[in-house]
Amino acid sequence: MVILFGTHPKYVEHDTGSVHPESPERLIAVRRGIESSCVKDAIKLFQPEAATLEELGRVHESSYIDALRRFCLMGGGMLDPDTVASVGSWDAAIYSAGAGLDAARKIRAGEADAAFLAVRPPGHHAVSDRAMGFCLINNIAVLAADLVAKGEKVLVFDYDAHHGNGTQEMFFEDPSVLYVSIHQYPQYPGTGRAREVGSGAGKGFTLNLPFHAATTGPSYMEALNRIVAPAVEAFAPTWTLISAGFDAHRRDPLTEMGLTSGDFCDLTLWVKQQTPSSKVIAFLEGGYDLSALEQSTAATLAALAGETTKPEPNSDGPIDFEMLKALEESRRRALSD
């Protein structure tokens, strides 16, 4: 197995200030995850190319792209109460958006079996016409749109503790993308209810699992096997893109979920086993406890290589069957409306 690990020096130039949780130190922690991984000899480093304006324009309005570029080059500032940009943020954003496109080219060329992309700023909250939730460009959506244009069927598997509202919005009516999100609810940004199932031709191709705070691994795995597996099997994706947000870790300062790095290994292994013929690329999203970020990166890299070695044990707790039953019923009603 060869696992691509994509990152770029320009990502550090996205300056969020001295107290922002989405800091350059996160990339240092992620790089430490390589050294602590049991599969570090299988990892191949690369520096991604930048995305073009045409590639960004598949998911973002041209007026927004132009305004974001000018805003950054004029010095940056606060885009909303949570999201900041600096002079270096434009280059960081386009090289982050290009990482998936570059990794996909390399995988198609037979240079690797899977990829993990340590990008920043993260992307899954960015919507077509604005930045939000620490995100400027929707990195995973840029790749998904490119793959769809090439005739591929794309599963986006998002286990960040915050719902990926931007990714959902961009593909809400698209039957070529199955968007699956497991997230804490209620939590920022307030979207991701089970009854949000897509619309038009895309109805049924959005699958949200809004979980209570403190939910642990056993409930995650039960939900995957009971609710998600049939949808993924029927969809039969050719590519699987993972929004690998590690803020559902029980030590994360911004959320209240109950996972460990061992659980992230299992989540990644599950989706790989569920889609054995699919090509897999994981994008870094959230995760703000640095030691948890290091361990979760190591666990995810191992899983991408098919290994089960874990930096820490899985979380434990009762399966919340009542919560899962309620989610199933809510989705069933939405699909029948």
Image (tube, rainbow, N blue to C red):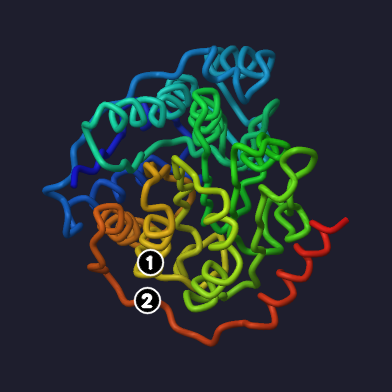
**In the rendered image of this protein, does residue 174 appear above or below residue 251?**
above
**Residue beneath the point at 26% across and 69% down:** 310
- Tell me if 224 is positioned left or right of 107 in this view: right
Q: Is residue 19 visible?
A: no
- Tell me if 71 is positioned left or right of 299 in this view: right
Q: Earlier in the sequence, mark 1 or mark 2?
A: 1
Q: For residue 135, which quarter of the picture?
A: top right
- Tell me if 101 is positioned left or right of 53 in this view: left
**Residue beneath the point at 54% across and 76% down:** 219
Q: Is residue 175 visible?
A: yes
Return the x and y of residue 213 as percentages of the image width and height.
Answer: 62, 72
**Residue beneath the point at 36% across and 61% down:** 269
- Check residue 266 in the rendering and tell me which mark sits there, or answer none: 1
Disc 1 to disc 2: CB gap under 8 Å: yes
Q: For residue 74, which quarter of the picture?
A: top right
Q: Residues within 10 Å of mark 1 (few under 14, many from 20)?
A: many
Depth check, front residue: 185 or 200: 200
Q: Secondary structure at mark 2?
A: loop
- Tell me if 159 is positioned left or right of 335 in this view: left
**Residue beneath the point at 42% across and 24% down:** 98
- Check residue 74 in the rendering and tell me which mark sits there, or answer none: none
Indicate the amino acid at tag 2: Asn
Q: Secondary structure at mark 1?
A: helix
**In the rendered image of this protein, does residue 208 appear above or below residue 52?**
below
**In the rendered image of this protein, does residue 334 appear above or below residue 47?**
below
Read off the residue under disc 2: 314
Indicate the amino acid at tag 1: Asp
